Image (cartoon, rainbow, N blue to C red):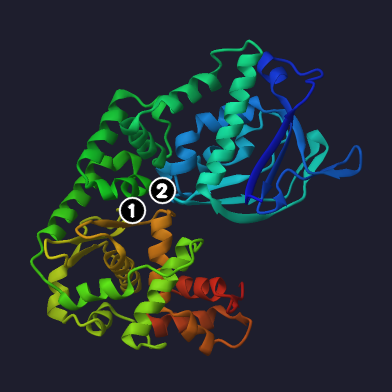
Amino acid sequence: MSDFTIDFEWLDPLGARGPELRATWARLAILVGGNSVTRVYDDQSKTVRDAVYLPLYPLAEWLAGQWWPLWNEPGPSASPDRSGYEARHSLVSAREGYALPPLRIEPAGSVVLLSWSAERLPAHRLEFPGQGEFWADTKTVKRGFSELINAVANRLESQGITDSLLQQDWTAIGAADEDETIFCECVGALGLDPYSLDDRQEEEIESAGRRLPEEIVTEFFRAAHRGELAAEADEIRGAVERTRGNKENLAKLKDLRLIVAPGGEPAQATPWEQGYSVAQRLRAYLGLDGEPLNSIEKIASTVGITEADLERVLSSFSDKAIPFAALMGMNEDLSPAFVLRPARTESLLFHFCRALFEYLCSPPQRSALVTNANSEQQKRNRAFAAELLAPSSALRSRVKAPIVSGEETEELAEVFGVSSYIVSHQLLNHGIARVEQT
């Protein structure tokens, strides 16, 4: 059985008003990871059922209207110019007075986080009692919603209804050629609708994209500030040029690319599992066991880079507020250079390790952008950095109780040179312990 299924059947619309609503009245059931997201408790009949009854047109229209952000905008972002994430990613926004479940869709590349929570709808005398979250295959989920939209569009046409907003939007999406699709994905990554842009916005986005290497364009738009596209694109372009023009040839670091690059992970490994695996291979190869790597200099010396070498391959972005933590680039010799965002010591170390992952795992002569976004790429390099700096094996040997205090977490953070936030997540994500809430 698929981890994500949508099942529906057309029903008699009874007293529904409006041609689109009458034509698409249906029974709808959604299953995520074997859980019924549409399970409801009906106050009136005192029964539980796994489906809701409603017209599918509002849902299909919302899906088509949010299509590009829905699959390309990771988040939510902390940036104030990225507000409205829930409206673009939760089925609550598609209700239009009907009882859709509060299913949230958060894309991260090849995987998508589907989450839902309990909610009571007094006006409908219904309650969605379930809650949960599940990482699903993006292609599977996208295909399921596409089939629903196609079915609704075909149903409308069979009932003599043409040129509805849904049909217009879905036709435009289906007609997009390769270049248009790339542009729409970049716009969607910004949380915008490509069909609602004015000429100025369109030119700003196209101009920013032209400034950057193809391999970092998507990650750029997933993190960039909408109102600072030109300035931020110029900052990143300058960083790319500096890294490509760097003359160092760090042979020992180049050798590590061949030794610890991704490979051997299960086909279904999540992005963070891939990141953990590379960090564990690197630590094992270097014979580190649980030894802390609590400074950039210590990491450099461990992999055979002198402080003088390190100084020549490190530089900084000019803006502390930039939403990019680091950039990794390679020169003609496939040797790396790194540009880091100015930050506190522990943050700088973490950003450097994220960029180091990108060097170890990126194709030759390609740059990589490390950002604040919650995309698949960023989840992978965050997991690598967390496991490299605060290895789960070392934490497990030090933490014996199922609950640790905030003070203990701070002490562990000081040992490993990371923030207490990183330690807390490592303890939780590896099933070692949870941090006591104060």
The vertical placement of 1 against 314, above or below, is: above
The residue beneath circle 2 is: 79
Give the residue displayed 44% in from the left and 80% down from the top: 391
* Tally of numbered discs: 2
- Element under label 2? loop
The vertical placement of 432 against 320, above or below, is: below
The amino acid marked with disc number 1 is Pro
Residue 3 relative to residue 378: left or right:
right
Give the residue displayed 38% in from the left and 64% down from the top: 381
Residue 6 relative to residue 366: left or right:
right
The vertical placement of 19 against 359, above or below, is: above
Crowding at mark 1 (Cα within 10 Å: few <14, some 14-19, many 20+): many
Q: Position of residue 306 (x, y in %)?
A: 16, 82
Q: Are marks 2 and 1 in contact (CB under 8 Å)?
A: yes
Q: Position of residue 335 (x, y in %)?
A: 16, 67
- Element under label 1? loop
Q: Considering depth in this image, is 220 or 84 the residue closer to the camera?
A: 220
Mark 2 vs 1, N-terminal side: 2
The residue beneath circle 1 is: 323
**Would residue 83 be visible to someone looking at this image?**
no
The amino acid marked with disc number 2 is Ser
- CA–CA distance in space, label 2 to label 1: 9 Å
Residue 242 lies in quadrant = bottom left
Q: Position of residue 46 (x, y in %)?
A: 91, 43
